[in-house]
Image (cartoon, rainbow, N blue to C red):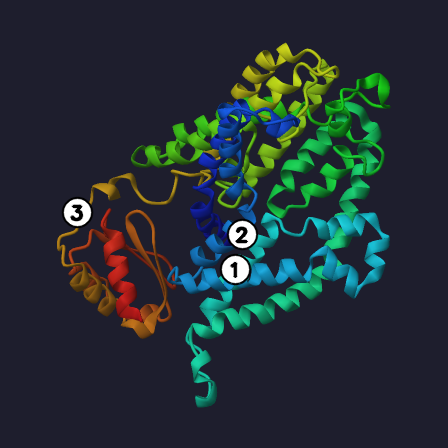
Amino acid sequence: MKFLQKLGKALMLPVAVLPICGILMGVGYLLCPATMQGGDIIGFVPKLGLFLVKAGGALIDNMAILFAIGVGVGMADDNDGTAGVAALASWLMITTLLSTGVVTTIMPSVAESADKTLAFDKIANPFIGIIAGIIGSMCYNKFKSTKLPDALAFFSGKRSVAIVSGVVSIAVSAVLLFVWPLVFGALIAIGNAIVGLDAVGAGIYAFLNRLLIPTGLHHALNNVFWFPTIGLGDLTHFWAGETSADVTWSLGMYMSGFFPCMMFGIPGAALAMIHTAKDNKKKIAIGLVGSAALCAFICGVTEPFEFGFMFLAPVLYLIYALLYGIFTVITVALGFRAGFSFSAGATDLLFSASLPAAAKTWLIIPLGIAAFIVFYIVFRFAITKWDLKTPGREDDSEDETKVQLANDDFTKVAEIILDGVGGKANVASVDNCITRLRLEIKDYTAVDEKKIKSAGVAGVIRPGKNSVQVIIGTKVQFVADEFKKLCK
């Protein structure tokens, strides 16, 4: 759990840049429907829309790379950029080695299987980005101080990190070469199995779709239901102007359930997170989940919201996926039908409402209101019942932001704290949150709390045998920076 929380914190950096991208794309689609529906792009306004869509898509489409670098830097012991470079090197190596062209050359039999080929077509996904980030950060933490023989001294220390990351990435790629298509194929088989279950099958699909978002494996199911992989193609037939009479299922049923959840459910869940955030952190929560909710409503880009809490509170993410499944069953059963060519936001709803397969689109109002209320109540109950660490609910006491450091000589404060924890040789890792300096130490008997408090800090907490947290207040970043310099 501690690893997941650290991973969730590391993801905050890349996630923070995504909401504005989604909003740009939503506005762009409104100004230039041709970017979604096809056709000529003529005139200033449509070209401006295309410009905005491409600007937002530049980051949304390369989200996996942002995750690789963000996780690499965020999970490194001292947030050093070297780990980000190593993570990027890992990402480039894995995605190149497992690209369809390379894999089919090494193993020609892969080209004979449509499912296996599809699996490697989708290898550049957020899951691989996160794996690359973890590889980069772990190699940095382990090898940043490596000393090599004089002949190889140039590659000692941090210069060795990217090299080691590359070697590890080769090994990981070799494993994924066999594992990835098996997992991908299993999910396609599951998709085939639930096709005949009507509304319940659509609900199961929606649940699995959200549940698999962190791994990128949702693409396997999407290809079963949205495209003609096995003869369905819900999305393809819907936008081709066909109706249910032209296919063997209720056209649009595998897309419709996402609309009330993305447009209204996510804003409801976001409001619950804001209301349950600590008073001193509500602005932080509003900035992150509020903008993500707007992004989801306009154009259905949900990753800024989902990656903001899925690793901080995985149980809540499971509940979130279940709500998608439940609302999809209800939506399909009631006869609401809408489709998307990008995602289930207001923009796609507007454009798809005029297509022949669209039906009872007015139901988005009662369904949306219900989704907003249910998501809000369920999220608020779960967060408060189990004290889940969603954005704005970190462990720091509300009063800690009011603490004033007794001495603004940050270097001196850091020196005293370092002396109090037994010197740099006793420090295993250094981190900080909004108000606390968080230290992992090797020998707990070497810690002198009185010495630490003599630096003028507000208090010292010992949450574990090898953990020391020093309450400094909102100036903690300055002390942490000086502390890290002293530990080098």
Residue at the farthest front position: 43
Q: Is tag 3's residue or tag 2's residue first in the polypeptide sequence? A: 2
User: On residue 404, which mark appears?
Assistant: 3
Q: Is 262 or 384 nearer to us in this picture? A: 262
Residue 378 visible within the image: no
Residue at 23%, 57% in the rendered image: 479
Callout 3 amino acid: Gln
Question: Is residue 242 toward the left or the right of residue 300 in the image?
Answer: right
Residue 149 image point, x, y percent? 46, 88
Asked if 294 appears above or below 477 in the picture, the reply is above
Residue 105 visible within the image: yes
Spatial distance from mark 3 to mark 1, Cα to Cα?
Answer: 39 Å
- On-image quarter of the C terminus: bottom left
Question: Is residue 231 toward the left or the right of residue 290 in the image?
Answer: right
Asked if 462 appears above or below 325 in the picture, the reply is below
Residue 197 image point, x, y percent? 81, 27
Q: Is 7 or 253 nearer to us in this picture? A: 253
Asked if the residues shown at circle 1 and circle 2 are in contact, with their CB atoms under 8 angstroms apart, the answer is: yes
- Comparing labels 3 and 1, the label whose residue is closer to the camera: 1
User: On residue 88, which mark appears?
Assistant: 1
Asked if 430 appears above or below 364 in the picture, the reply is below
Callout 2 amino acid: Ile
Mark 3 falls on what kind of element?
Answer: loop
Spatial distance from mark 1 to mark 2, Cα to Cα?
Answer: 7 Å
Mark 1 falls on what kind of element?
Answer: helix
Q: Residues within 10 Å of mark 2 (few under 14, many from 20)?
A: many
Residue 104 image point, x, y percent? 78, 59
Spatial distance from mark 3 to mark 2, Cα to Cα?
Answer: 39 Å
